[in-house]
Amino acid sequence: MNSLIKKFRHFRSKSQPWWTIFGAPITQEIFFRFIPYLLFLKSGNFWEIGIISSLSYGLIYYYFGWVLVVYTFFLGLIFWYLMVNFGGLVN
């Protein structure tokens, strides 16, 4: 069992920089921009989807403190408005 844990730690230490540089941003774009935008196109609920998407995005930064959550929430709403109204994924 110790051998398995050591192999996992070795793999994790090698893959961590790549996940931080490529994996996390791509995953965030998919979950917090692409999927909400598709839901908006189907439902037309601009504010509801924008608020839920921005709040969930802000909450993943909770470990930095509530100030960053609030800041990220409002910045997310501004970017949601700009993306939907002035361009973004699909126009």
Image (cartoon, helix red, strand yellow):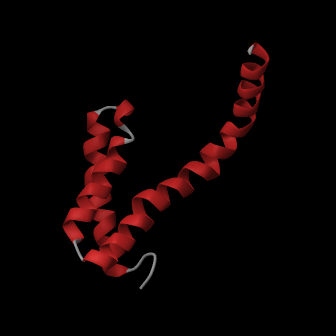
Q: Position of residue 57 (x, y in %)?
A: 36, 50
Q: Quadrant of residue 82?
A: bottom left
Q: Position of residue 78 (x, y in %)?
A: 28, 63
Is the N terminus in the top left, top right, bottom left or bottom right quadrant? top right
Q: How many marks?
A: 0
Return the residue found at the far front: 1
Of residue 39 and residue 34, the one placed in the foreground of this image is 39
Q: Is residue 75 visible?
A: no
Residue 2's place in the image compared with 4, above or below, is above
Left-right relation of 7 to 55: right
Residue 39's place in the image compared with 60, above or below, is below
Residue at 23% over, 71% down: 46
Left-right relation of 48 to 75: left
Residue at 41% over, 85% down: 91
Residue at 72% over, 28% down: 8
Left-right relation of 78 to 63: left
